[in-house]
Image (cartoon, grey):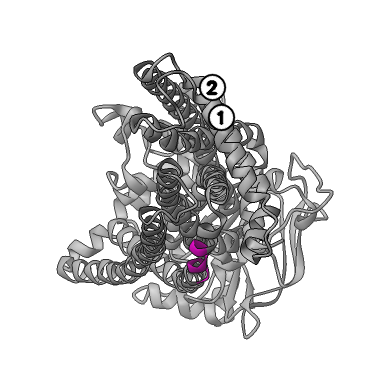
Amino acid sequence: MSLLRRTFSCLKPYWKRILVASISASIHAIMAGLLVWMAGPLLMTLLNTADISDNGNSKEAVVQTETIDTEIINKNEFNLEEKLDADLDFLVRTKNNLKNGINEIVTGRDKIETLFNFCLLIVLIAVASNLFLYLQGFFMAFVQQSVIRDFRNRLFEKYQKLSLSYFHHQRTGQLISRVTNDVVVLNETVDLGFNRLVTDSLSVLLLSTFLVLLSWKLTLLATLVLPLVFGFIYLMGKKLRKYSARSQEKMADVNSVLEETVSNIRIVKAYAMEKFETGKFYNATGDFFRALVRMTRLRHLASPVNEILITGAGIIILFFAGTRIIEGQGELDAGDFMTFIIALFSLIKPVKSLMSIHVKIQEGMAAAERIFKVLDAPVTVKESSNPKEITSFNSSIKFEKVSFSYNKSQPVLNDISFEVKKGEIVALVGPSGAGKSTLFDLVPRFYDPTEGCISIDGTDIREIKMNSLRQLLGIVTQETYLFNDTITANIAYGLKNISMDEIENAARAANAFDFISGFEDGFETEVGNRGVRLSGGQRQRIAIARALLKNPQILIFDEATSALDTESEQLVQEAIDRLMASRTTLVIAHRLSTIKHADRILVIDQGLLAESGTHQQLLEKDGLYRRLYMMQFKEKEPA
């Protein structure tokens, strides 16, 4: 499916409103065209010519005019031009029928009454035209906002489905820009594609028909300029698509710098880097400004060039036909000529609008490419076509020859096998970058192993329904993630029908109740963006309370106390000990003193399982674990 067709396929759910808007646009265009057509008869009335007489004899005058026209057309002459006129005599009949229709409606007993009827008819047409213009705008506005909402919802839903590896290669500002800036640019294309296409296309068709009816020769002369206009617009569209894509990328860079600076404002201020970050932001906005200026310069060049070309054609026709009328050689009377000129110049606006559609569509397609690139991104961690539902953990977790790499050239884990029985506490230690966090990230399926498998109670976790697998797990990490909401909402995150007593009990068990009660708003205290209003130890205890309330059967701790001071660590460790009671626990430990009582300790080194045993057994082996332990406790001899 082409990019353009795929983009506009999003309008299918709203076809009824689009139909109403299109019909309204059509009626509006017809009404506007009628106003143009009435210019000639109105002029003839004001000039008191034979078309509409003040004695009420207009019908006879029109019949006489038509008879004269027909006689002229039917002259049996061998002149090629007159023969072609004779072949097109239906144009004259159609023109006269239209004029007769207007005359019959507005002709009164005298010139004043006829003029009054003209004014009344113009008012009625103008009211009807603008009424249908409003209806078109209202219904299309609903469609446009619905399209924006749908694309934003689809993008956000896609972000939830994509695995963590996708986000490792994307800047946050770029992801935000897809949902904000790119969707708005795409919406402008939808606006032009439907909001103007019907009205302007019908206006061009109607006004062009008037021109042909009035004088096909002058109309043919006017069309000679069209190849120049279309060629120019095509070239502008190609360049604008490239410039639009570039400007949207620069806007994404602005969003990225802004998001990163705000998120890391504490570090920025700590290192006195305000001027550096300001300069970086200025550079980003400057690049966006320059890209936007290039695109705007090109976009605004199209309009005046088109108008000059079309206006030039109109002036040539005005001079050519006007000269013939003045010399008494013209085929048009004054009223028809006035209608022709008004219709010709009225044609400029819808033609310009239709020309700009190509330009705008090229800009929109650049945004659509970026949006659909996200929507089409492969989901590497997929749910099985027939997943199994599990509600409890009964036996063991097995890692069988598990290997993993973010890319093929750099393996992170290599052929790791071990088993964790229900109720065991298994700790994972090793140097930084050894693959500890990655190994335990495989359990909730943040990633899938590239080789081997992980099973729970004998079932490969890839065959388990994702939601039910993660319902078994409680995860507390070194970097605590809190939402900009109340403490209550953060503790009860993801859970429904939770009472306040349950939340308070979880806070007590996590050693968080006392400091929460000390806040003026207590549990309704807003924690700020990422919990910035709380200390590290407070954030960690909120996270533990959240895990306690969830009451998971399997716990994963990723260096949960490594960044805390001694007092906070003691409080958090007490909360962790309560949380681990009677639960299967996987612990990544930075401070080895916290895992002395683990049932088993696994030592990971360069992606390999180097050692396994209890704390005492590993000290006696005099291997990597002993060296790591001695580095942390140089003053103590191992027992």
Q: Where is residue 614 drawn, in percent x and y?
A: 60, 66
Would you say the residues marked 2 and 1 are in contact, meaning their CB atoms lie under 8 Å apart?
A: yes
Residue that lies at the very extreme toward the front in this rendered image: 76
On the question of residue 362 being in view, the answer is no
- Between the C-alphas of marks 2 and 1, the distance is 6 Å
Local crowd at mark 1 within 10 Å, few (<14), some, or many (≥20)? some
Q: Quadrant of residue 311?
A: bottom left
The N terminus is located in which quarter? bottom right
**Highlighted range, magenta:** 221-227
Q: Where is residue 133 drawn, in percent x and y?
A: 47, 32
Task: Tell me the residue at 72%/67% (across/down).
Answer: 418
Q: Quadrant of residue 587?
A: bottom right
On the question of residue 172 being in view, the answer is yes
Q: Where is residue 403 drawn, in percent x and y?
A: 70, 75
Task: Tell me the residue at 64%/40% (across/down).
Answer: 93
Q: Horizontally, is 569 left or right of 377 in the view?
A: left
Where disc 2 sits, the SS reads helix
Where disc 1 sits, the SS reads helix
Q: Horizontally, is 533 left or right of 510 in the view?
A: left
Please give the residue where the numbered disc 2 appears in the rendered image.
104
Please give the residue where the numbered disc 1 appears in the rendered image.
100
Residue that lies at the very extreme toward the top in this rendered image: 109
Q: Horizontally, is 266 left or right of 489 in the view?
A: left
